[in-house]
Amino acid sequence: MKLYTTAKAPNPRRVVMFMAEKGIEGLEEVQVNIMAGEHRADWYRAKNPAARVPALELDDGRVLSETRAICTYLEGLHPGSNLMGETFEERAFIEEADRRVELLLFLQIANCIRHTHPALAVLEQPQFKDYGVSQGEKLRETAKWLDGVLATQPYVAGERFTIADITAFCGLEFARGLLKYRPGEEGLTHLQAWRDRIAARASAQKAY
């Protein structure tokens, strides 16, 4: 199998961190330079018409091109160190938590950066600055909600580390790098403490 990825991009980082947590090694990685437009090249569009990273090419030639679908496939191949739920009940609650942080926090951060940061103008044309600014305001509302969640439980989905923590962490690290966002500086002490704990994990270091 081949993983088409981009160093430091948040969605590919989710997959790399997921793999590191599960101890998955030996998967061929192909770097796609999105800043140079390689994701729009004909050879890549033939694999992923959406022209986004990451993408996982299976041995039979089929391609998975959604981050969570890739993780679901890898979880099925490597069920040890479970990150998506052991029972149907646990899977449902972990998926709910993961989707919430993806569709709210993660997406708000991505939209803010893509529409306000000059360096990403090459990826987002046209940029709508007002929209990006509004997304930055919304991400802070979502961060306050997540801070409240983490005041009552150690991890995003409950009592153990799961894919939901990976999604939230990779989103926050994207904001940390390009928006210089630090939850602790805005009084979100629970979210900051959680971020610092996750950042200390070996998978977080490997996925950087």
Image: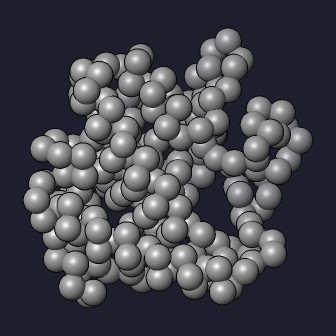
In percent of width and height, residue 177 lies at 45, 75
| Screen quadrant of the N terminus | top right
Where, by quadrant of the figure, is residue 185 drawn? bottom left
Picture layout, residue 133 above or below residue 90: below
Q: Which residue reaches farthest right?
A: 42
Residue 130 placement: quadrant: bottom right
Residue at position x 81%, y 75% from top?
126
- Tell me residue 70's x, y (percent): 52, 32
Q: Quadrant of the C terminus?
A: bottom left
In the depicted structure, whether residue 189 falls above or below residue 12:
below
Is residue 22 shown to the viewer in this render? no
Drawn side of residue 185 relative to residue 70, left or right: left
Q: Whole-percent x and y of residue 61?
A: 71, 17
The reply to whether residue 2 is visible in this rendering is: yes
Residue 89, percent from left and from top: 25, 27
Give me the residue at 72% from left, 80% from top: 128
Identify the residue at horizontal 71%, vertical 57% (top origin). 34
**Residue positioned 45% across, 32% down in the render:** 71
Look at the picture and state if 132 lies above or below 148. below
Q: Which of 89 and 53 lies nearest the eye of the viewer?
A: 89
Tell me if 22 is positioned left or right of 70 in this view.
left
Residues 177 and 108: in front is: 108
